[in-house]
Amino acid sequence: MKKYKFSSIFANLKLRPIVSEEKDKYLSVASLEKLRKFIPNIDIENNIDLLPVAFDACVVNRVNKNGDVIDTATAAKIAKNFINKPINIEHNRNNVIGCILNYGFSEFGTSQIIAEENLFETKKPFNITLGGVIWKIVNNDLANKIEESNDPTSDYYMSISASWELGFDQYNLVVLDDDEKNIENGRIITDSSEIEKYHTKLKGFGGDGKFNNDQNIYRQVYGKVVPLGIGLTLNPAADVKGIAVTNHDEPVNNSENTASENNTSQEDKLNVIKDRIYMKISKIEEITDELLKEVKASSIVDFINEEIKKASDQFVSEKTEKESELKSAKEKMESLNSEYSNVKSQLEEVSKKLNELEAEKIARANQETFNMRMASFDEEYELNDEERKVIATDIQDLTEEAFSAYKNKISVLMKEKNKAAKKAAKEKADKEDLKDKSADEDKNSKTIKSAVASEEVAQPISTTQVVVEQAVDNGLKVSTEIPNSTSAAEPSVKEKYAKAFGLEGFDIK
């Protein structure tokens, strides 16, 4: 069987009458009477194990409580495909109690029959109405309750309704005001991107069905749509209510329903069935037409109950296993999340420390560069504290290129303070001074020697004279340098004495 992308079971809250209980009772009777026109023509005299029924399966062009709807075109296309599909209890496919045999269309609210050709392009709500049979032999108690639900005096009156199930691959969105249900009054969204954007709001996907504060959003099924069956329920989602059965007060419209020659009553036939030999059924393939003629109804019921129990036990086992796996996965996920948080915290701490180290490294490098630059200026120029402060502020954040340009500028502005240049200039000046002094001393020395030589030639030297001349020479050494203006003529001995010692105290002859 093809697996459809989506399936939907249209079941929800039980419908409540909006008019008085007494008035609603007679309206419901009228509806059930009209529904009986869709009951299959079954020979219930000779098929006492069958309960023919008819019911409204859904309302077309009108949204249901589950947030789903089909339009006229889809209804006309799929209605006939309900034939031969199962009838089960509350959409439990393991609890099938009958099947669908015919279909039709009726007015919404009145159940009046509508010819299929009259549905063309209508946008008004109408019903898909189905007829089928309930297998009493499967669940006779339910069959009795369905019959009792047709009795206005019973507590079960109108308590059981039909709910449909579909498989489908495509859908549009319908947006309606809060008080609207008919899709003709809404806005249809067909754009795939818009559908993808808003589909999570749908009840079928776990949303709340609200489009905004005063509007609701619904799913309009279309395309390849397959009816999957009918579930009998106390809580129909669509605006449908009740299941009609044959009115035993009316004559049966079937020529094959005449009594047999033996005039056997239904009660006799039931007694015959009850007296059949009990047979144990072990698998569903054993249920054949011939077997149904031989076994008691309880055999079928027992087999179905056993199968249901097996399915239930298997479901519980699988559910427990899945819950255990889910719990284990959840614990593992929590552990991974905890480990992830720890690793993330550690990584953040390491990253923080690395950033701090990197910042310290950059700061040290910058400080080292700054120190080297300042040292180069101190080495090259004679700077005072104020000049150092100005230069330090200027070069603090300079790039290599900007510093090179700044250094060139300083070399021009502070060339007078360049240590190397000042040292060279001083050495040159000292050299010049030394040269000039050397020349003066040499000239004075030559002048003195010339004067002494002249005096020696002029007269002989006595002992007393020598002593006196030595004293004169000593007096000359104490004196200051000989001026450049000194005459080249050698002074007399008298003049020397007078200059050195004065004439007082000496007896010159």
Image: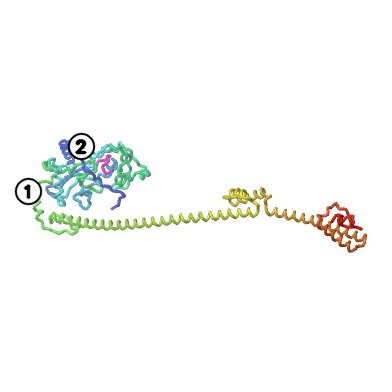
SS at circle 2: loop
Magenta stretch encompasses residue 63: yes
| Direction left: furthest residue | 262
Residue 500, visible in the rendered structure: no
Left or right, 139 with respect to 461, comes to left
Q: Position of residue 486 (x, y in %)?
A: 86, 53
Q: Please provide percent x and percent y for residue 164.
A: 24, 46
Q: Quadrant of residue 442?
A: bottom right
The amino acid pointed to by label 2 is: Ile
Colour scheme of the picture: rainbow
Q: Is residue 97 magenta?
A: no
What is the x, y in percent for residue 458?
93, 59
SS at circle 1: loop
Eye-nearest disc, 1 or 2: 2
Query: Quick one: label 1 or label 2, which is nearer the N terminus?
Result: 2
Q: For mark 2, does the 10 Å Cα neighbourhood hold few (<14), some (14 to 19), or many (20 or more) residues?
A: few
The span picked out in magenta is: 59-66
Residue 313 image position (x, y, % from top left)? 22, 57
Quadrant of the drawing holding the C terminus? bottom right
Q: Would residue 422 be seen by someone viewing this image from the given angle?
A: yes
Residue that numbered label 1 is attached to: 263
* Mark 1 residue type: Asn
Q: Nearer the viewer, residue 306 or 472?
A: 472
Q: In the rendered image, which quarter is residue 344 located in?
A: bottom left
Contact, mark 1 vs mark 2 (Cβ under 8 Å): no
Alpha-carbon distance for marks 1 and 2? Answer: 48 Å
Of residues 258 and 468, the one nearer the viewer is 468
Q: Is residue 130 left or right of residue 380?
A: left
The residue at which mark 2 appears reads as 18
| Horizontal arrangement in the rendering, residue 149 relative to residue 428 (left or right) | left
Identify the main secondary structure in magenta: loop
- Other-residue count near label 1 (Cα within 10 Å), few / some / many at <14 / 14–19 / ≥20: few
